[in-house]
Image (cartoon, rainbow, N blue to C red):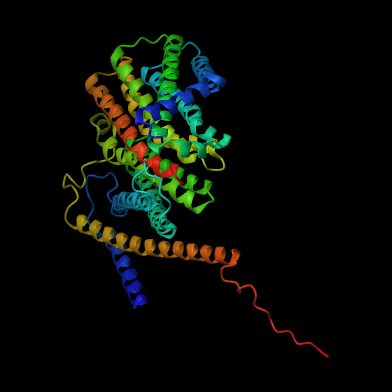
Amino acid sequence: MKTTLKSIFALLMGVATVWSFTVPDVAEFQAPGFARIFLWHFPCPMLFTFLILTGAWFSIRGFQRIELKPWRFEPETDAMAKAMWDVRSVACMELSYLFAALTMATGILFSEIQWGAWWSWDPRQTSFLMVLLIYAAYFALRFAYTDPSKRAAHSSAYALTALLPTLFLVFVFPRLPQILQMSLHPSDSILGGKIKGEYAYCVIFILILFFIMTAYLYNLRVRAGLAEIELDNKNERLDNGGDSAPTGVVRPVSLSE
Amino acid sequence: MNYSWRAEILAIFRKEWRTEMRSMSGLVTAFLFSVVTVYAISFAALNSKLPKTVIAGMLWVALLFSAASSLPRTFLSEEEHGTADLLRLVARAHAVFWGKALFNIFQCVATSVMLSILYLGFTSTPVAIPWLFAVSLVAGCLSLAGAVTLCGAIASQASNRSMLAAAIAVPLLLPLVALGVSGMRVSLGDGTMASGGTASAIGLIGYAVATLATGPYIFAAVWKT
């Protein structure tokens, strides 16, 4: 059953690839043929935004497992639940970073063709690079903590702290009037109804396929993370002697006369 | 022992103040950093007249690195001296955050005022809209202090805490720098209030409010682990 589903997905991805090469040209672009990269570029920031919001939500849930009201001293309630929320949160963050990198890569390619430079200090490009730096710091923070519970709490705190600047950089900064005047990047392609007809159908189709692929990858990452936690717990029990034979058991030894 | 919030916050602030007055290391470091930065920029410019946008940008970069290098110390020193656990026992998380954030705000404002006077004096730059300059500086300091205090707490238990605190704080503060440069550029006479001055001032105040309002809650969750 799983193999059949994977085969259908691969087939649909092939259909999307062929379709993205055959959609009619859009005259607004300098190189309409290359402008088709938009069909693959656009779903990436959509999924990035969705994943960072989901990751931040999982971080909040992880905190609620630690303690809901900060002014009360309470012991940790459920270490396993905390670890599970952390695994979900980090799975979202890792995938979001992948889509952020893809957004930047496809954007740079299109920038060279459309604007004549790989990097033109466009405000939209620059603000997205800041977002990449913010989330690079998230992973640097995770690497700095070796204790899993501290790593979970501190990186969740950073994920929540980073949410405000990220939302500002993604949604507010590029739409400020003085920035809009300077930017070459279009800001009203979707809301202004400029993407329509076959172009719109194709981009929605690719977005749905990306979403399915993301759900699959997320599921794999969470399962791998939970397996790691289970393995660590088993190793810890073995180290503490929890699964070893009880003391006082005597093995029979044969004695020769 | 049931102390009021105000008493607890003031006690933490006094503790930070006394610790600082005993060694003066934070203020002296920040002062030295300011003087050296201003001198380095003036030296690099070699008497040439810099554009207002460049002057505003360099001032904000100096403020950013001055804050990122000196402000996280309030938490890092607690972990280094082993006094953090005692603080966890005697004070509530919100009070610890506010006490340290207030001290950092004071230190940041003092450094920024000193840095700005030196910088504008050395580069002979007049301020066209003083109130906008003051708003940019004060709201910027509130945001810087709030965000760096939180980042100091987040990084305080890591192995390479000093470098990490600055490394995670600087990317978070880049949007603030963009707003600050935009506001300060207008305050120095490059552009009008309508071309970004008002939007930047509102943005800086909003950033400061959001940072200081959410900071204690995020900090409280980290402080207990």
A244 and A33: which one is in front? A244
Q: Is residue B148 above or below residue B42?
A: below
Farthest residue in the bottom direction? A257
Horizontally, is B204 left or right of B159 in the view?
left
How far from the left and from the top, in percent, is residue A18?
A: 30, 64
The residue under the point 44% across, 23% down is B63
Residue B190 can be seen in this image:
no
B174 and A153: which one is in front? A153
The residue under the point 79% across, 87% down is A255
How far from the left and from the top, in percent, is residue A163?
A: 34, 42
- Quarter residue A189 falls in: top left
Disc tally is 0
Quadrant into which the N terminus of chain B falls: top left
Residue A215 can be seen in this image:
yes
B153 and B49: which one is in front? B153
Horizontally, is A175 left or right of A197 in the view?
right
How far from the left and from the top, in percent, is residue B189?
A: 31, 14
Q: Is residue A239 above or below residue B113?
A: below
Q: Is residue A107 above or below residue A82?
A: above
Horizontally, is B22 left or right of B182 in the view?
right
A220 and A108: which one is in front? A220
- Quarter residue A89 falls in: bottom left
Farthest residue in the front direction? B1
The residue under the point 41% across, 41% down is A134
Horizontally, is B97 left or right of A174 in the view?
right
